[in-house]
Amino acid sequence: MKKYLGLFAFLILLISPFTSAAQTIINKYAAVISVQSCNSLFVDTASDFNIGDTVLMIQMKGAVIDSSNTASFGNVLNYHGAGNYEYNVVKAKSGNNLTLFYDIQREYNIPEGRVQLVRVPSYQNYAVNQTLTCMPWNGNKGGVFAVHVTGTFTMNQDIDVSGKGFRGASGNPSTIVGPPSICTNPRYYMGANFDSTSRKGEGITEVSMDRAFGRGKLGNGGGGGNTCNAGGGGGGNGNTGGIGGSEYMGCNNNPANNNTGGLGGLQLAYTSSNNKIFMGGGGGAGQANNLNNTAGGKGGGICIITAGSIAGNTREIRANGEDAPLCTNNGSFGSCHDGMGGGGAGGAILINTNTVSSITHISLTGGKGANESGNAGYFEVGPGGGGAGGVLWTKPATTPSNLVVNNSGGLNGRVLYNNSAWGAQPGQDGLSLNNLTFNFPTDTFSTDTITANFSDSAISCYTYQFTDKSTSLSPTGLSWQWLFPGNNISTQRNPSFTFPDYGTYTVTLVVASTSGCTTSDTVIKTISIPYQHFAYAGEDTITCPGGTITLQAAGGTGYSWLPATGLSSPHTAATEARVMQTTTFIVTVTNNQGCVDKDSVTIVTVPGQSVSATADGDVINCDHKTVMLSASDAISYRWSPGIYCDDSTSATPRVRPNVTTVFSVTAVSAVGCISQDTITVQVFSERSEIFVPNAFSPNDDGLNDDIGPFVLCGFTLEQFSIFNRWGQQVFQAQGPYAKWDGRYNGKNAELGTYYYYIRGKDDNGDRISFKGNFILIR
C-alpha cells in the first residue's frame, strides 16, 4: 500500500501525573497484517489497544537491495517505506480491526515491510522510577520504546533498549568436524550450506533462503563468514559495521587479503528530508566446523522521547548493540576454534525536546565482535567484526550541552592466544543529528479535524431538542449519526427525541467527513431527565363522617380525581367531597407541556361526641333568679334563644327567662362535627307551688318508676298521702324526698287512678294543702 499524505496530527491524552511506571515495558505492540480501508488496519491482536489511544505507526523493513553476487550485494536501491513512522489515534475498534482517526500520511508496505503499531502512553509529568525497556524485536513487532510527556520527564532510573533491535544471525555449525575440506569461499550470497558459509545478520530487508547466507551484508545486517572459519561482519546503522576476520590460516596466511570474512552492515540514510529511523543491524554469524556457537549480536532498538523538558539526573538512555556471544573454551579439541560472530549495531534515540535540564547520558555503542579463544598453537581463524555506533537525533539545532553522548563503534574480536585481529575490523562510530522534526510531507494531503459536541434542551416533559455544536474545517461536508436509548438512530443534524421516562440516559453523536478517507469524532454524553413533581393535591385533613370538604388541587391545566365516588366534580381542580370514612384521594395532573404527575391527599374521618346540656341545681327560676346552663365536649357553642343568655356563645351561660323556656345548644367539635341538645327552664310566677306528675309507670325500667311532689320555691312538705279509688290509704310520707314506688302491702298496686293529699308550710310559715290525682300505668 502506498499513500502520500500530509498534515500530521498528534493527540495528547492527558493522564493524571504518575510518579512511577507500573511495569518495565510501558508500550503495547501489534503487527499490521493488512489494510481494510482508508484508515482501517487489521492487526495480529488488538486486545491491548483502546479507542483514544495514541499509537506510533512504524515500518521496520521493506527496503529493496542489490542482489547480485558481488560486493554490492545488500546495498539499498530503494528504501520505500522502511524507516517511516508517524503518530495517530485509535478512533474505533472491532475485533482485531483498528480504525485510525487521522488519515495515514506516509508510504507503508504491508505486510512485507513489517509494519507495526506501538501504543504510546501520554502523561502530564512522568518520573522513571525503575528501568524501562521495550519488547524485543521478534521479526514482526517490538524493538521500539516511545513515550509522550507534556511536562517534565524525570529520570530516576535508566531507559535501556540495548539488544532489542534486529536479530543477530544464529550460529549453525558445519556438518564437517575437523580440518576444513573447503577453503576460500568468496561468495556474497548462498543458500543454507553450513559447510561453506554462515548466515547473515538481520536488517531492513528480507531475502529468500537461497540468498540469506554468504559474506554479503543484508542492508544494515552484517554478512556471514565463509569457509573456512571466517568471522561474521558487524551490524550497521549510524555507520558501517566492521568486517569479520579472515579464514583459517591453513587456507590463507595473509589476513590482509581477506575475501571470506562477512562484510559489515551498511550505514543507513538519516536526513531531515526523509525522516526515517531504524533499529541497529544484527551481526553476521561466523563459519564453524567444530560445533561451536558462533552467532552474531543483536542490534539496539529505537527510543523516542517527546517531552516538554527532560531532567536526566545523570541517568542513562541506552540503545547499544549487543556483543556477539562469547565462546567458552572447554579445553577439548577444536573448542572455540571457529569463525566468530559479529557485534550488533547501536540503535536510534530521538530526543524531541528543547530543554534538557540536567546531565543525561546517551549510549549508542556498537556491540563487540566475539574473540576466537581456541587453544594456543592452532592456526588463526576469524574473530567477529564490531558493530557500528547508532544515531542520536535531537530537536534543537545543536546537541543540548547536558547530553553526554557515546556512539562509538564496537571493537572487533581478536585471536586471544596471540592478540591478533586476523583481519577483523571494528565498527565505525555512529551519528549525532539535529533539527529533529515530526512534520511529514503535506504536498498532496489535507485533513479535516472534527471535534464532535452537542447541547440539549427540554421542549416538553420527556422530549429534548439536540443541537449539533461540532466544529470542523469543512462544515458543509459532514454527516451525523445520533444513537439514542433503545437503539434509536437519527441522521438529522439537530434531532429531537422523547425519552420513555425520567432517569439517566446515554446519547452518542458521531460526526464524520463525507469526502475521501473518513475523518470522524465521537462524543458521548449523559442526559438526566429529572423527575418533575408539580402535582399538588392539598394537605391531609380531618373531618366528621358524612361531612363535606373541598378538595383543591394545583400545578397543571388538567385534573382527574380518584376515587370519584362522593365527588361533585372529579375532573376539576376544586371539588366537593362527601366523606363517610377515611379516604385517600389521588389526583392526576397534566401540565401545559403534556407532562403527567400525581399527588394524593388523605381525609381522615373522626367521629365527634354528642354535646350534653345541663343546669346547676333545680331547673326552676323562682322570683326570676338566674340559672347557669352548661354544655361540654366541643370547642364552640351557640345557645338559643340568646335573648335570655348573658353570653350565648359560652359553654356556661347564665339565663333569666320570664316564662318557661326550652333552651337549645348547638356545639362544634374540634374536627368540625356538629351536635345539639336542649334543656327546659320552668318559670313559676306564684309563690310556694307544688308540682305532682299526672302519671307514672313503676315497671323497673328506670324511667318514671316512682312518684312524688316536686316542691317549688321554699315549700316545706309535712305530709304526702295517696289513696285508692276505694278510699284506702296506700302510701304516706313526709319530707322533700317522699316518693311512692307503686306497691301496697308488698305487692304491685292495681292499675288505675289514685288520689294524693299534700300538707305543709310555705316560706312565710303559713299552712297550705293540695289535692289531686294521677294514674298508675305499667
Image (cartoon, rainbow, N blue to C red):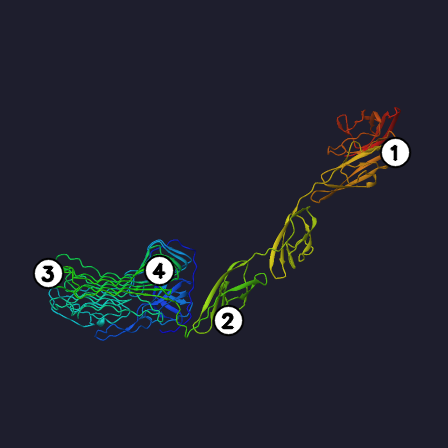
N-terminal label among 4 and 2: 4
N-terminal label among 3 and 2: 3
Q: Is residue 619 left or right of residue 324?
A: right
The amino acid type, in three-letter code, at marker 3 is: Gly
N-terminal label among 4 and 1: 4
Q: Quadrant of residue 198?
A: bottom left
Q: Is residue 365 visible?
A: yes
Give the SS element for disc 3. loop
Q: Position of residue 681 (x, y in %)?
A: 81, 36
N-terminal label among 3 and 1: 3
Q: Mark 3 = which residue?
A: 377
Q: Nearer the viewer, residue 281 or 313?
A: 313
User: Dot 3, crowdedness within 10 Å: few (<14), some or many (≥20)?
Assistant: few
Q: Quadrant of residue 100?
A: bottom left
Q: Mark 2 = which residue?
A: 475
Give the SS element for disc 4. loop
Gap between marks 4 and 2, in whole Å? 47 Å
Q: Mark 4 = which residue?
A: 401
Point out which mark residue 307 bears. Answer: none
Q: Is residue 725 visible?
A: no
Image quarter (top left, top right, bottom left or bottom right) of the C terminus: top right
Q: Mark 1 = which residue?
A: 685
Name the front one of labels 4 and 1.
4
N-terminal label among 4 and 3: 3
The amino acid type, in three-letter code, at marker 2 is: Pro
Gap between marks 3 and 2, in whole Å? 82 Å
Q: Nearer the viewer, residue 440 or 771?
A: 440
Gap between marks 4 and 1, in whole Å? 136 Å
Give the SS element for disc 2. loop
Q: Quadrant of residue 205?
A: bottom left
Name the front one of labels 3 and 1.
3
